[in-house]
Amino acid sequence: MEVTYQHDSSLETLIAHTATPKGIVEALGKPSGSRFYRCAFQVNPHQYGQRHAKDAGFSSEDDYNDAVAKACRENGIQVVAVTDHFRFDSSEKLAERLRADGIVVFPGFEANSSEGVHILCLFPPETTGSEMNTHIGACEVRDLKAESPISNKTCEQLMRLVQELGGIAISAHVTSAAGMLKNLSGQTRMNVWKSDYHLAAAIPGPVEDVPTDYSQICKNKDAQHKRSRAIAFVNASDVSKPDDFKKDSATCLVKMTDVSIEGLKQAFLDAEGRILLNSDGVPSDYTRLVALSWDRGLLSEQSVALNAGLNVLIGGRGAGKSTVVESIRYAFGLEPKGKDASATHKAMMKELMGQKASVAVLLHSPRPSPGYYLVERVYGQDPRVKDQNGDIINDLKPIDLVPGLEVYGQHEISELTRDKAKLAELLKRFVGDDDRVSVAMDNLRSRLRESRGGIAGKRQKIEELNEALAALPGLREKLKRFQATNLKEHAEEKTAVQAEARLIEKVAGMVAELEAQSKKLRPTQDTAEPVLPNETDQKLPHRSTLEPLQRIVQGINDALRSASDTLTTAHKATEADLAAVKTSWEPLRDAANKRFEDLKALLAEEGHNPDEYVSLDDQVARLEPKQAEKQGLEGELASLRQARQGIIDEWEKADTQAYTELEKAAKRVSKKLKGTVKAVIQPSSTIEPLREVFRSHVDGNISQAFGKLEEVEALSLSKLAERIRDGAQALMTEYGFTETSARKIADAGEALALEVEECRIPPEALIELNVGRDGSDNWKRLENLSAGQKATAVLLLLLLDADAPLIIDQPEDDLDNQFIAGRVVPIMRTGKKRRQFIFSSHNPNIPVLGDADQIIGLTPTVEDASDRTKVFDDDCGSIDKVSVQQLIKDLLEGGEQAFTTRRTKYGF
């Protein structure tokens, strides 16, 4: 029976928002696969308490039933089994009352075997009262009127009968009176305990608290009672009054897609992942993708609900599995890690999404407070993020919401195995919660770039001054020769007037700067922006104490405006004064210029060139102050370089610290994957990042130089930068470069040296995989493994601790099949309890052995002569859903006949 999916009430506004994609709204109304239901498997009706002298304090059956229903709601109980002793008629009214409150009821009874063992017998929710009475009759009960009737059938016979009738059995209170372990002994107990019909047993607490006499049996360590599949334990003690629901022994959590006998069966067969006792605690929340929808393109008008655990996309070749994976990557703006993967991603998005196609992703983030976000991206546009109210959050990148999100396309993991530096990057997630080293390096990298910009700016100004000042010695010498004549005396008034003009220009520049500063200081409005938020937006406990802040800010605003007004007034006054000076001076200048013009004719007759002399004098007078300016800039440049050296020292220390943290992470990984994978960090064996820096500054072939640099042990990039500054000879002496290479590199000069200092050659990760069998060790390095073994080692790293979703397209394509069931699946099953997985697959081991919480079937179709993919609700769910079981057999096993043929052929 399917329980109606209830979406989070905090999503109501987003759902109602007109701009929310229709597909996301539809997805929120769809089942999201298996989920935990709180179940009480041994709830007794009112008559049971009366017969067994367990008075619950209620005068009527209706009052009792109402109280039980209320207690279920208060304790979050969604599923109940009513189990009177070989009776059902007494339970019908309680079952009806519970169903009225939306609680799923398994009709049942508590059987008492011929050996005196109690068994809870549960049947499908749709089973009628008459059918239940027929089932009870099939148990061959001796006296139905007895307080606790006894069957003529043995314990094992009853469990078999229940299964044949379409139900499922749970051995009740196995370690207590009338329990299987307590009442049976010897070979009988061994046979019944190990029976294929015995799937689940009820205990009052955790397995660790089971009485010593039965501890080894329950832990499946007793050789005589050892089962091929461990028994599933549930907490299911008697509930005879509403307060009993509060007891930890009364309920447990069971994961199912639909509440059904098949759902219970699958949970009992896979108790590790599908049953939580109250002592296990509730799993902590983590960031996860909740729903996906598409508009236009291959997946046009399709939507899916995702599970918090393991989601597996299945479908034939070309069904759209890769499109789903790559569209999620596209929505978050994530770049593939490999070149081949990048090309595939771009081509797929262009081909299968196309113009105006869009993808939307709803995600849940539990910290710092639970909230939902909607990520939307139209093909060719940037992603947009909306909050759960439907409001766009500007400047927020989707990946900032899920910083650890990882997406890998087909064969991308295999491509990743060929890059040791990127393998080392994978280990960063195991450095721990303290990301101070990473933050420090980002800050230092920013400071280095800022420093480089400052140095480059000063150097450019100095070079410009050098170009201008290069002419000064010649100009001075020429002027000196002019001054040896009597021309200086004749032109003295003219050159003095030019000096006056230069003074007026200087002051005019200062007046203009005054105006610029006035505009810069002026606030945009008279009233300062509010400092304190509106009371409806945020409640501040000490608002009255903080209210003076607004006056302070207004004071600052007023001061800036006053300063701006003062500068504006000063600008107008100085501008007027300057204009007055110019008005008085310009006639004097004009008269002096006229006298000089009259003199020029006479001087020309004497063989002089007065215009050239006056021009030379003006040029020299304008250039000479630039020498002082250059000296000042050189001093500033020296200070910048000294400050940069301090940043370089910090950078190198941070780099060493990052290396140390990665070494710790590698040890942590090796410990977690003990006996399977080892990881070691070492300095890079290549200098590719440095090569990229050189390529951007140096033309031509310098392969000889790179060969020499790769031979240097513990290459210091700051030292290399200094040698570049020192010149070609220093490079030849230090590193053995040829003269040609050395000159090319030295000619790149300071620009290259600065970037070399900032370059970081990341370390490499050496990965080893244990390929030994039957418990033996056979460690091999990644480069000596097959392609499938390499990918297996990397996938094991990816599956380790993290709290962000991991999305992989057909991981089995790159994996060694030997490792999937034996090593990959167990880690996947454990990891899905604290992290969301979204895989596409055509290998049954991943969804079946991994016990996928949500299997999503993709069906290729053709509409209007175009390929389309459909997602049908019946093709979504867990392995406990019959339609999904059939889908797995058809798509992953090649059909039931093929599966049966293989099973027969292999002798399974």
Image (cartoon, rainbow, N blue to C red):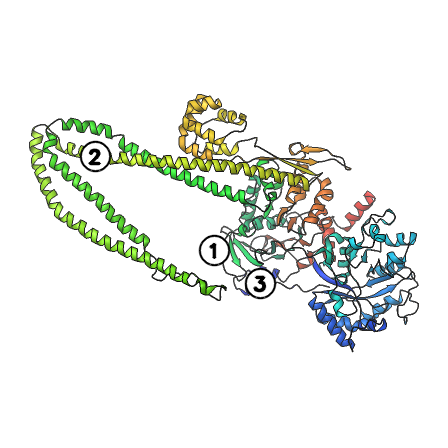
Image quadrant assignment for residue 280: bottom right
Task: Measure the alpha-carbon separation of dots 1 and 3.
Answer: 20 Å
Using the rendered image of the protein, determine whether residue 81 is visible from the camera's viewpoint.
yes
Which quadrant is the C terminus positioned in? top right
Expressed as whole percent of the image width and height from the top left, the position of residue 459 reads 35, 35
Q: On screen, 860 above or below 621?
A: below
Q: In the depicted view, which residue is nearer to us: 78 or 22? A: 78
Decide which of tag 2 and tag 1 comes sooner along the chain. Answer: 1
Task: Identify the amino acid type marked 1.
Answer: Asn
| Nearer mark to the viewer, of 2 and 3 | 2
Residue 389, how many percent across, how many down? 53, 62
Q: Nearer the viewer, mark 2 or mark 1?
A: 2
Amino acid beneath label 2: Gln
Q: Amino acid at mark 3?
A: Leu
Quadrant position of residue 28: bottom right
* 734 relative position to 8: left or right: left
Residue at the disc numbered 3: 11
**Dot 1 corresponds to which residue?**
394
Q: Split into 4 quadrants, where in the image is the N terminus?
A: bottom right
In the rendered view, tell whether residue 863 sits above or below residue 509.
below
Q: Tell me the SS state at disc 2.
A: helix
Which of 3/900 is in front?
3
Question: Is residue 699 something that shows in the picture?
Answer: no
Badge 3 density bin: few <14, some 14–19, many ≥20, Cα 10 Å: some
Left or right of residue 865, residue 192 in this image: right
From the top left corner, tell me how far across and down residue 127 is, in percent.
Answer: 80, 67
Going from N to C along the chain, the mark reached first, 1 or 3, is 3
What residue lies at 84% left-to-right and 72% top-to-bottom? 53
The Cα–Cα distance between marks 2 and 1, rounded to whole angstroms, is 54 Å
Among the two numbered marks 2 and 3 on one chain, the one whose residue lies closer to the N terminus: 3
Residue behind mark 2: 619
